[in-house]
Image (cartoon, rainbow, N blue to C red):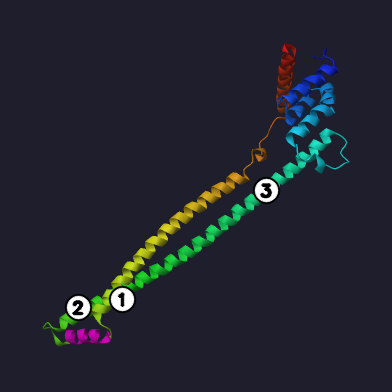
Amino acid sequence: MAELPDELWRQILEIGVKSCGLTYKDLCCVSISSRRLRRLSDDDCPWSHLLSSDYPSSSSSFPSSASSSKSLYKIRLERDRNRKEAAHRRAVLRKESQIAEHYRRLGELEERLMEETNKLTTTLTELSNLRTVREATVALNVWQPEVIRVRQKQIVEQCSVSVDSRSRTLDMELKLCKQQIAIFRKALKDEKQRLELAKEELTSLKYHPLKDHKFIDSSNNESCIKRRSKDVINSKVKQLRST
């Protein structure tokens, strides 16, 4: 490899970029392999081709202070990265707002369910009292001791509405309460499922493999990068020789 002239190395890098075999990451990996490859990989030609292929319609938006195609590519890459990070933050905020809305709906549904449950309990209590009144009305027509008969009469006189009509009304209200409770329970279940799904989506949005704080041996990492760079270079040399 050291015997190859600089011009041949420039052609290898240029062919690698033009054939879409080398990306900007590959060029950066090649540049850390040796001082010579660092100097050659900073050449303007491969970076100019990368700039025109990756960002074809944005060359006019670059500042005139940038001196080389590599600098221009770096500026555009930083802009693109900042745009993606901003879009990611907006997506996270939207998902967090959606989770807050799910919690609000859950609170409303639980409150409505509690109201219907209390209404059901009240209806059942009133129905039980009406049954007692009905039993007392029947007991007045049956012979029994005077003390018990007076008590049954007091129970009947305390009820100022028709027992039968009120019982029918309460039966309908009881059925309606049960239906409403079933609806609210199903809505609660569905809302909890949507909440869990939104939480999973938020966790997936916030996850980033590069933020996994695990110890990495930098020497081994650099050696892997160098091996990869040399493999890429060797394959391009073989391709060039075959042509």
Q: Secondary structure at mark 3?
A: helix
Q: Secondary structure at mark 1?
A: helix
Q: Of all residues shown, which one is farthest toward the left?
A: 143
Question: What residue is shown with label 2?
Answer: 135
- Give the extent of the magenta segment: 147-159
Q: Is residue 185 magenta?
A: no
Task: Classify residue 43 as left or right of residue 17.
Answer: right
Instruction: Name the kind of residue labelled 2 in the image.
Output: Glu
Question: What residue is shown with label 3?
Answer: 87
Q: Is residue 137 above or below residue 22?
A: below
Q: Is residue 193 above or below residue 57?
A: below
What secondary structure do most residues of the magenta stretch adopt?
helix
Instruction: Name the kind of residue labelled 3 in the image.
Output: Ala
Q: Position of residue 138 (x, y in %)?
A: 16, 80
**Disc 2 and disc 3 in contact, CB within 8 angstroms:** no
**Disc 1 and disc 3 in contact, CB within 8 angstroms:** no
How dense is the environment of label 1, judged by Cα within 10 Å: few (below 14), some, or many (20 and up)? some
- Quadrant where the C terminus sits is top right
Residue 42 seen by the camera: no
